[in-house]
Image: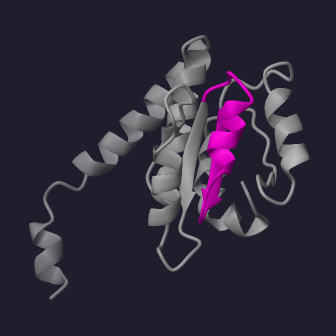
Amino acid sequence: MGSKSDLKHVQPAIDLLAELRVPHEVRVVSAHRTPDWMFEYASSAEERGLEVIIAAAGGAAHLPGMVAAKTLVPVLGIPVPATVLNGLDALLSIVQMPKGIPVGTLAIGEAGAANAALLAASIVSTRRPDLRERLRSWRESRAAEVLGATDLSLESRTAR
């Protein structure tokens, strides 16, 4: 993430990766304040064994694109609602990457963070059957939650 203040928006991704038992690291890497560290982090990602990078940033949101420019590891971008534009500026910055430097862009904020973790787990699970089964089980549990609450007519009558 570009700043420690982004942590609250990224936390759903961290929690899901932990729940799915996907090894991960959590770092502050600012494209603007620590560009040399950002270049080092991104350019060494593949040799350090990273398979997917989730990069969250707000405002001008250069982090996901700059990281993607320095590695062939897939980069997933989470726009952070850090300015008065509530993340729309970050979304547009991340989604409008030039041809040749792709960044998979997710929704703004916590929903995007959760989906980034799920997408990263999906990508990594193509070569890890145990993770694929944990991911399948996680999704089945979400479906069971919805199916267990399909008839809310009794609840709505008692809530009145």
- In this rendering, the count of numbered labels is 0
State whether residue 128 appears in this view. yes
Residue at screen point 76% across, 26% down: 50
Is 144 positioned to the left or the right of 131 in the image? left
24 or 108: nearer the viewer? 108
Q: Position of residue 142 (x, y in %)?
A: 37, 44
Q: Who's the residue at 75% across and 37% down the image?
A: 24
Q: How is the image coloured?
A: one colour
Q: Residue at x 87, y 54 (%)?
A: 34
Quadrant of the rendered image containing residue 156: bottom left
Q: Which residues are magenta?
A: 53-74
Percent of width and height locating residue 118: 51, 37
Find out whether residue 113 is within the magenta segment.
Answer: no
Image quadrant where one finds the N terminus: bottom right
Q: Residue furthest front?
A: 98
Front-most of residues 27 and 19? 27
- Magenta-span inclusion, residue 73: yes
Q: Is residue 21 visible?
A: no
